Image (spheres, rainbow, N blue to C red):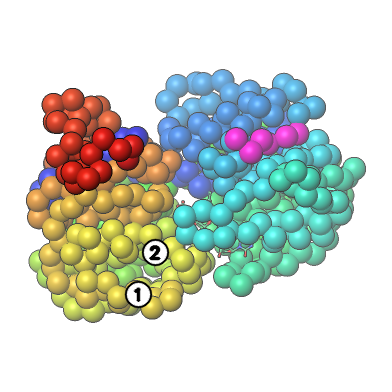
Amino acid sequence: MDAFIIKGGSRLSGRITADGSKNASLPLMAAALLADEPVTFRRVPELSDTANMARLLGELGCDAKSGGPGVFTLSNVDTSLTHARYDIVRTMRASICVLGPLLAKRKRAAVSMPGGCAFGARPVDLHLRGLEALGAKIELNGGDIVATADRLKGATVFLGGPFGSTVLGTANVMSAATLAEGRTIIESAACEPEIVDLANLLNAMGAKITGAGSPRVTIDGVDQLGGADHPVLPDRIVAATYALAAAITNGEVIIDDFPYDYLLAVVDRLNLIGVHVDRQDENQDPTCCTVKITCDRRLKPTIVTTQPYPGFPTDVQAQMMALLCFAEGNSIITEKIFPERFMHVAELTRMGAQLFRQGPTVVVQGNGRLVGAPVMASDLRASASLILAGLAAEGETIVSRVYHLDRGYVQMERVLASLGANIERFNPDEVAEPLKKAEPPLVETVKPKSLAGKPG
Ligand code: EPU
């Protein structure tokens, strides 16, 4: 398991480009299961999650042919396969995206029930209720969700839950409804840009979807879907993470392909605390433009509440917490999407952060200083938060288990190093092995005499 070693204190400067969006790519790729012709994707980020999705689709008879970096074409060569196995689903919850497309196109889907994750239970009840409303029969069999339907029938489906709508649930129901008989209305649909991107792909394939990006999406079912050629939208969470990396090091960074319009809630909070996100050319498309990040010497504290889009994204909460450690005064962060998503709190505390958690709220007492320490990544965005903290901390930080990070950021250490960060990837097992050989066995020196020689 790789780790990063970071020597903090370098101000980031330079120019980078945001990758294509992971969270858009996964449901987009799954939607290729609906097509009768090949579907080509561009700007797909080369990540373990997108590789896992390609592997899962391969197991479902949907082959991927590479067309160069970030480009590949998916074609259905065997439409008899319908089982998404536990071995893959457990590595990536987003495997649930294949449920709707498989059911609609192949009349049956068996998808291993995803478990919880580091930050909570993560149920899929809304996905299942939505598909049942379209006429699917759903059973749980040996840990698999088994959904069957001869042909789905359009219906009005309400997808609001206790924490707002569901992004992947909306993707599943919207994808399935494209091939249903008649009209489906999704009420309380997720409004995230990734849903709009999916609707754009499905419409390019021949679907009839209107209203994507608003809480009411209308889908008029069609008999079949064809191919398409689709560029994935830029990753708003990756773009925001690098903007925050620039800010936490008091740096000056230009970011190309920055989805400014999709990050207005983040830009708003950054402006308030003294971080400037300036568009470089007003004529550019505001969803994919060039911005320059600069910041005031002293940052002000603020209040951050995560909410469904267009509110402040939960996927940037952990990184924002690291930044607010450097504001002068108390900030308040409240998590309204995943109330347990605070795995980074204990690790940031190891670096000297003054954090006080009460349920879904954390008070960040900014004191302008963190100190490097060995810390452990526990999920994707928590990892990003620890790396940001390490960039600004005094001394050396070792972030272990960065495989979480590799799920969502393409070679983050290289991107940060290109901006002047002192960061390297290494394998702690390879470093520890020679040390183990060189040192005398610890047990001989510390064992009390009375226990010496007994099995330990
Ligand atoms: N929820 C339910 N029932 C459901 C589904 C969701 O109660 O059937 C609840 C969840 O427990 C949560 C809330 O609804 O409290 C929102 O969950 P949602 O379903 O929207 O999450 P998701 O679709 O599984 C996607 C992203 C997450 C991101 C969330 C929220 C992908 C692959 N994942 O997950 O991204 O945090 O939306 O915006 O798109 C990440 O990238 O680090 C990540 C976790």
Label whose residue precedes the other's in the sequence (1 or 2): 2
Residue at x 27% of width, y 31% of height: 429
Q: Quadrant of the C terminus?
A: top left
Q: Position of residue 266 (x, y in %)?
A: 35, 64
Q: Position of residue 390 (x, y in %)?
A: 19, 52
Q: Kindly indicate whether the residue at mark 2 contacts the one at mark 1 (C-beta within 8 angstroms).
A: yes
* Residue labelled with disc 1: 357
Position of 207 relative to 262 (above/below): above
Q: Is residue 221 left or right of residue 302?
A: right
Tag 2: amino acid: Phe
Label 2: how many residues lie within 10 Å, few (<14), some (14-19) or many (20+)?
A: many
Residue 357 visible at all: yes
Q: Give the residue at the far front of this rendering.
A: 450
- View quadrant of ligand 1: bottom right
Viewer-proximal residue among 64 and 396: 396
Residue 185 appears in which quarter of the rendering?
bottom right
Q: Quadrant of the N terminus?
A: top left
Q: Position of residue 29 (x, y in %)?
A: 59, 37
Residue at x 90% of width, y 43% of height: 150
Q: Which residues are magenta?
A: 82-87
Tag 1: amino acid: Arg
Work out how far the residue at label 1 is from the one at label 2, CA to CA, in angstroms.
9 Å
Residue 215 visible at all: no
Q: Is residue 45 left or right of residue 56?
A: left
* Residue labelled with disc 2: 342
Would you say residue 106 sits in the magenta stretch? no
